[in-house]
Amino acid sequence: MHTYIIAEAGVNHNGQLGLALKLCDAAKKAGVDCVKFQTWQTEKIVTRKVEKATYQLENIPDAEESQFDMLKKLELSYENFRIVQDHCKKIGIDFLSTPDEEYSLAFLMNELNLPLIKIGSGEVTNIPYLRQIASYGKPIILSTGMATLAQVAIAYDTLLIAGAPSVALLHCTTNYPCPKNEVNLRAMQTMKESFKCQVGYSDHTMGTEIPIAAVVMGAEIIEKHFTLDRNMEGPDHKASLEPQELQYMVDCIRNIEVALGDGIKRPNPSEVEISKVVLKSIVAKVPVKKGDVLTANNITIKRAGRGIPAAHWDMVVGTKALHDFDIDDPIKID
C-alpha cells in the first residue's frame, strides 16, 4: 500500500514565483509525492464585485477588498507555471495544478501535458465544465466538499461518460479551517462502497491527526494544505501545515502503511523465536512415576521453553506416564 500524498500549495505562494519554488522544495523535503497549485485567470472565474468568503474575510480582514482583487494579487502567470513544473521535474516531485476555468484547463493539458487532473469541490455541480475536463481523457481526482452523495453520483457518472478513464473521489469539508465535528470521515467509506472507486481525503482541519486517521480508514490519496509560515498574510495560510508538520504527517502515514500489513493473521518470524520461551508447555506438577495416570493433580502448565504445548492438554490428560518426571520436567509422550 502506498498513499499518494498531495501537498496543496494552492495560493500560499501569495502570487510570487520565488515563494512557489520554495514551496516545491519544502514539499519535496517533507517526502510527499506531489505538490499542487491552482491555475486561473481571475477575470474568467469571478465578477469584479463578488464579496470574499467568510473564511477569506477572517484571514484577510479588508472588507473593502473584493474577492476579485484578492485573487488577482494571488494569480501566477502561465509562464510562471512552466517554471514551477520544470523545477519540480528537476527536484523529483510530481507537479499538479487545479484548473479553475477552461482556458487554464487547456493550458495545463495542452502546454504542460499534466498526467491527471485534480478538480476542486466548487466544480462538482458544474456539469458542462466536468464534461470538458473529461474530454481530455486523463485520470481525474475530484474533491467532493459541499456535495451530497446524489450530487457526487451525477458528477462521477458525468466524468466517466464524457471520457475520463478513471475517477478518484476525495471526501472533503469546504471550510477553512474545518472543525473536527464537521469532518465526517465515514462519508469517505460511504463513497467507496457506493462507487467502488479509489477514494481519499482532502483535509482542511488544523493539525495532522485527521488525515492520518483517514489512511487507517482506507484513504489512498491524502491532500493537505501547507505553507512556509502560517503567519503570512493570505486566505489559506492559517489552515495550513508548516513544513515540519507536513513532514511529521508524511512520516506517520508511511509508518501506518507498513503497520497495516497484508491482513493475514499469522505469527511473524520474530514471534516464532519468542514463542518458544513465552508459550506454555505441560510439565510435572509433582514427582511422577512411570505408569502414573496423568491428571490435573500431577501435571500443570508453565513456561518451559520446550515440551508438549498447552494446547494439547486434553490429549495428555488420562494417559499414562511413559517415564519418571521430577517437578517442572516437561512431559514427553514417545
Image (cartoon, grey):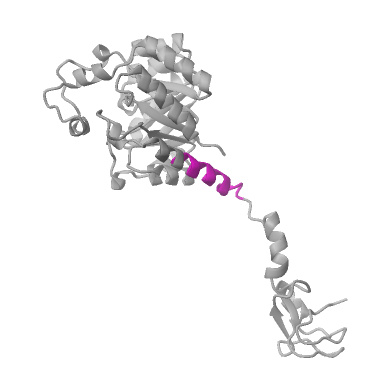
Q: Is residue 180 magenta?
A: no
Quadrant where the C terminus sits is bottom right
Q: Is residue 250 magenta?
A: yes
- The residue located at (40%, 40%) in the rendering is 245
35 in relation to 75, above or below: below
Q: Position of residue 29 (x, y in %)?
A: 48, 32
- The residue located at (79%, 82%) in the rendering is 329
- Give the residues in magenta: 249-263
Quadrant where the N terminus sits is top right
Q: Closer to the camera, 197 or 267?
A: 267
Q: Closer to the camera, 140 or 73?
A: 73
Q: Position of residue 153 (x, y in %)?
A: 38, 31
129 in relation to 7, above or below: above
Q: Position of residue 225 (x, y in %)?
A: 36, 33
| Residue 32 visible in rendering | no
| Residue 250 visible in rendering | yes
262 in relation to 305, above or below: above
Quadrant of the rendered image containing residue 53:
top left
